[in-house]
């Protein structure tokens, strides 16, 4: 089994979505939810959320299947500044199908590199994905 983890193809559509998302001009919290198409072994768009909240994003994620989330978070700092950090979040619930977990794990670094994101976080339980958790990771 070692060495043969399939890295799923990142479709041209997803590559363009990632590029457009990175350079978007809208000033709100938004997310791209990406999933693996098992049959085609490709990473595809599951959902795009604009002007969303962490709570709403959490409600749009499945609790028993892995997902990749590219998040543009509107962060309000204590000194009044506002920033929009881009984050790569890998949700991998412990009770998801092992084959699916392997496909996601094998594709994670390639997708993170394609998205050009250095802030990468992994979550094992959907309930842990809260605004407090994110702010702790971002160092607010």
Image (cartoon, rainbow, N blue to C red):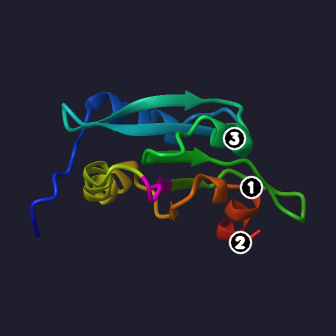
Asked if residue 58 is positioned above or below residue 126 in the image, the reply reads above
Q: Is residue 43 left or right of residue 20?
A: left
Q: Is residue 110 above or below residue 1?
A: above
The picture places residue 37, in percent across and down from the top left corner, at 28, 34
How many circles with numbers are drawn on the protein?
A: 3
The one of 119 and 133 positioned closer to us in this rendering: 133
Label 3, label 1: how many angstroms apart (C-alpha)?
A: 12 Å
Q: Which residues are magenta?
A: 89-95
**Cα–Cα gap, marks 3 and 2:** 17 Å
Residue highlighted by disc 3 = 29
Q: Does the stretch in magenta take in 58?
A: no
Q: Is residue 89 left or right of residue 38?
A: right
Q: Residues within 10 Å of mark 3 (few under 14, many from 20)?
A: many
In the image, which is nearer the foreground, mark 3 or mark 1?
1
Tell which circle, 3 or 2, labels the residue nearer the N-terminal end.
3
Circles 3, 2 touching at the beta carbon (< 8 Å): no
Quarter of the image that includes the C terminus: bottom right
Most foreground residue, 4 or 119: 4
Task: Report x, y in % for residue 6.
Answer: 16, 52
Query: What residue appears at the point 65 percent right and 60 percent down from the top-left corner?
Result: 128
- Can you give x and y, in whole percent of width and height, for residue 47 in the image? 50, 29
| Residue ID for mark 2 | 139
State which mark lies toward you, 2 or 1.
1
Dot 2, crowdedness within 10 Å: few (<14), some or many (≥20)? Answer: few
Residue under pointer 1 = 131
Q: Tell me where residue 29 sits by quadrant.
A: top right
The outermost residue toward the front is 95
- Distance from disc 2 to disc 1, alpha carbons, whole Å, reads 12 Å
């Amino acid at each position: 089994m070692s060495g043969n983890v399939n890295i799923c193809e990142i479709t041209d559509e997803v590559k363009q979505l990632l590029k457009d998302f990175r350079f978007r001009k809208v000033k709100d919290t938004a997310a791209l939810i990406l999933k693996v198409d098992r049959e085609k072994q490709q990473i595809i768009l599951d959902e795009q959320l604009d002007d969303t909240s962490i709570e709403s994003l959490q409600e749009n994620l499945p609790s028993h299947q892995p997902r990749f989330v590219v998040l543009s978070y509107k962060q309000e700092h204590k000194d009044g500044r506002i920033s929009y950090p881009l984050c790569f979040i890998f949700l991998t619930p412990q009770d998801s199908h092992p084959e699916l977990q392997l496909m996601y794990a094998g594709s994670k670094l390639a997708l993170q590199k394609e998205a050009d994101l250095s802030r990468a976080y992994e979550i094992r339980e959907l309930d842990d994905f809260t605004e407090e958790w994110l702010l702790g990771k971002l160092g607010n």
